[in-house]
Structure formats: C-alpha cells, structure tokens
C-alpha cells in the first residue's frame, strides 16, 4: 500500500471527486453516488453507485494492465477510493450500454 495522505479537493464532477495527495505524482479518486441523465437535466442519488463504479473501473484497468496496456491505476484504497497516477486528461467521454438508448436510439430508429 502506498504511503500517502489525502489532501485538498482538486476537482468535483458528476461521478467523482479528485484529491491531491502528499505525493505530487499521485491523486485519489473518490467515486460518488450521484446520478444524472439528460445532460444533467435529471439528478438523483443511487445508493452504492460509487462503490460499484470504483470496482468496475479497477477491474477494467487491471484487465488492461494484464494485457500490457499501461494505465494510471496504482491501488484501490477503499470501496470508494482509488489511488492513481496524476495524468493529463484527454477530453473524451465514452458511454457503454447493454441496450440501445438515448440519442443513439433516436438517431438509429431503434
């Protein structure tokens, strides 16, 4: 386990908060239970969502690492928090669904 202490909040978005640490090259990501839809038009809370998002994210990053794809994952600190390398964010959002929904569904007529 990395020996770092949690510092000030650097960022808060729809799904997570990011905190500085005592190591300038590492940050802590804290996953929230907040849920939004319709570009933020609908807001609510889903108990346990942050825990599941943290677990799913770490499983995916671990799978990528196993296949030789480097990620920013360092270690899972708790149910909601993960220690990661501080990186420059690529402004790309990917939404994965098990069914056709939203604007894709409207555009494709499904």
Image (spheres, rainbow, N blue to C red):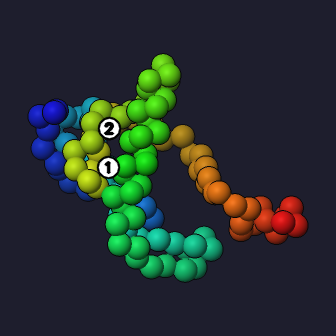
Q: Is residue 17 above or below residue 109?
A: above
- Which of the two residues, 19 or 66, is positioned nearer the viewer here? 66
Identify the residue at image location x=69%, y=61%. Answer: 99
Earlier residue among tags 2 and 1: 1
The answer, for residue 85, to whether it is visible in the render is yes
User: Can you tell which mark lies on residue 88?
Assistant: none
Q: Is residue 8 above or below residue 23?
A: below
**Where does the N terminus fall, quadrant-wise?**
top left
Q: Is residue 86 above or below residue 69?
A: below
Horizontal side of 17 relative to 99 (left or right) equals: left
Whole-percent x, y for residue 50 in the image: 36, 61
Q: Residues within 10 Å of mark 2 (few under 14, many from 20)?
A: some
Whole-percent x, y for residue 98 in the image: 65, 57
The answer, for residue 70, to whether it is visible in the render is no
Identify the residue at image location x=46%, y=31%. Answer: 63
Q: Which residue is mark 2?
A: 84
Mark 2 secondary-structure assignment = strand
Horizontal side of 104 relative to 79 (left or right) equals: right
The extreme top residue here reads 68
Contact, CB < 8 Å: mark 2 with mark 1?
Answer: yes
In the figure, residue 45 lies in which quadrant?
A: bottom left
Whole-percent x, y for residue 71 in the image: 43, 30
Q: Is residue 8 above or below residue 49?
A: above
- Which of the two residues, 98 or 3, is positioned nearer the viewer here? 98
Give me the C-alpha separation between circle 2 and circle 1: 7 Å
Horizontal side of 70 relative to 97 (left or right) equals: left
User: Can you tell which mark lies on residue 29?
Assistant: 1
Mark 1 secondary-structure assignment = strand
Q: Residues within 10 Å of mark 1 (few under 14, many from 20)?
A: many
């Amino acid at each position: 386990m990395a020996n770092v202490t949690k510092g000030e909040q650097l960022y808060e978005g729809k799904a997570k908060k990011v905190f500085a640490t005592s190591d300038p090259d590492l940050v802590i990501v804290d996953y929230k239970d907040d849920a939004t839809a319709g570009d933020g038009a609908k807001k609510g809370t889903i108990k346990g969502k942050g825990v599941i998002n943290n677990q799913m994210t770490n499983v995916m990053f671990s799978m990528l690492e196993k296949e030789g794809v480097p990620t920013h994952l360092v270690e899972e600190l708790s149910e909601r928090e993960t220690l990661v390398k501080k990186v420059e964010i690529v402004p790309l959002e990917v939404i994965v669904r098990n069914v056709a929904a939203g604007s894709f569904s409207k555009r494709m007529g499904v």
